[in-house]
Amino acid sequence: MTPNAPSIEPLAKDLLSLSQLSRDEISQMLDTASELKRDYGPFRTALRDKTMVMLFEKPSLRTRVSFEVGFTKLGGSAIYLDHQHNRLGERESIGDYARNLERWVEVIVARTFEHDTLVQLAEAASIPVINALSDMYHPCQALADALTLREHFPDLERIKLAYLGDGNNVCHSLMLIAAKLGFDITVITPQGFAPNSKIVALAHEIANDTDCVITLTSDASAAAGHHAIYTDTWVSMGDETEAAQRQAQFAAYQVTESVMAMAAKNAIFMHCLPAHRGHEVVSEVIDSPQSVVFDQAENRMHAQNAVLLHMLAGNCAPQHCDDRSPEHAGEIVPG
């Protein structure tokens, strides 16, 4: 870092799930992300001579570009390895792969189908592993979402967020960050598409300490009075064969102008993208002044860079990382 750069407290651990971070650690990361968004100048050499490898089993626009551009802004270099046609663990074991990578790079960013792939990478590698999306969690997205919410509602503990749609990885991470930071969340899903019960239980356990209220319902009208309305695609990557069936099952959960009208005054609309206009949201909402979807997309880079800075702040090289927490996987890794 340059001499005048703000001090960054090292958080030497993997980020597979937000359950691994404390409320204070999340707040520190959000503060750092806000500083970065204001001015990258003090951080332009923070990760000089460091290299990040990106292992992607799924296609990506926001995740890939935001990580690559972001790491470059901090002075480092990124290597992208496309595993869309050669899944991790097929050519050689995931453990061997990780133990090779740790000899060359300082951090692994992985976007995988199965969360267990990330767990195996983290267990084998002596360098940090960051979850860039798995079937269970999307922690970097939730950090960007919290940053976006804080920009519109500085007192996060006083807001209520409504999530409509599939109880998927994004929903899981939103519940966890709401529980950690203490803002209320209402999860509205069709019958049979509720979030994972173990993650719900964990979120409730965390919420007991922050006075967060987590509500699960199938009643779309429960979004009334909320400060932010959030939705995601009804069909996740890998589940495309279910598209036609889900269209009918989720039709009542589409975010329309009438849904936004029953939300709180000055409510915002959120979506992690890519969006399917006419499915989970209508164009009149996503293209309206209430929509902050592209702020969320921009904030992915700032939030992820904050994670990278806090993970690598101690100039953590492979041979110096043996004191990292062994609890790589977080509390929940459902089968």
Image (cartoon, rainbow, N blue to C red):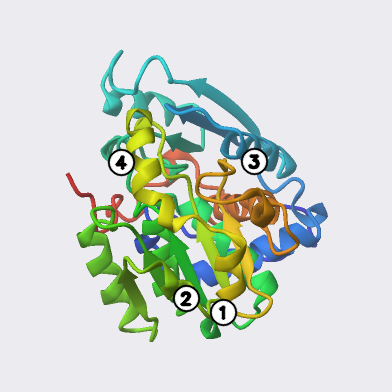
Q: CA distance from mark 3 to mark 4?
A: 21 Å
In the displayed structure, does residue 288 sit left or right of residue 106?
Answer: right
What residue is drawn where x is 59% and y is 43%?
A: 277
Crowding around mark 1 (Cα neighbors within 10 Å: few <14, some 14 to 19, many 20+) is some
Q: Secondary structure at mark 3?
A: helix
Residue bearing the label numbered 3: 66
- Verify CB contact (< 8 Å) between mark 1 and mark 3: no
Amino acid on which the number 1 mark rests in the picture: Leu
Instruction: Indicate which disc, 2 or 4, sits on the residue closer to the N terminus.
Output: 4
Q: Nearer the viewer, residue 207 or 6?
A: 207
Q: CA distance from mark 1 to mark 3?
A: 25 Å
- Verify CB contact (< 8 Å) between mark 1 and mark 2: yes
Q: CA distance from mark 2 to mark 4?
A: 24 Å
From the viewer's perspective, is residue 219 above or below residue 233? Answer: below
Q: Position of residue 88 (x, y in %)?
A: 34, 23
Amino acid on which the number 4 mark rests in the picture: His
Instruction: Indicate which disc, 3 or 4, sits on the residue closer to the N terminus.
Output: 3
Number of numbered discs: 4
Amino acid on which the number 2 mark rests in the picture: Leu
Q: Nearer the viewer, residue 281 or 271?
A: 281
Instruction: Indicate which disc, 1 or 3, sits on the residue closer to the N terminus.
Output: 3
Q: CA distance from mark 4 to mark 1?
A: 29 Å
What residue is drawn where x is 72% and y is 40%?
A: 75
- Verify CB contact (< 8 Å) between mark 4 and mark 1: no
Q: Position of residue 248 (x, y in %)?
A: 37, 44
What residue is drawn where x is 52% and y is 61%?
A: 230
Q: Secondary structure at mark 1?
A: helix
From the viewer's perspective, is residue 176 above or below residue 153? Answer: above
Residue bearing the label numbered 4: 115
What residue is drawn where x is 65% and y is 35%?
A: 65
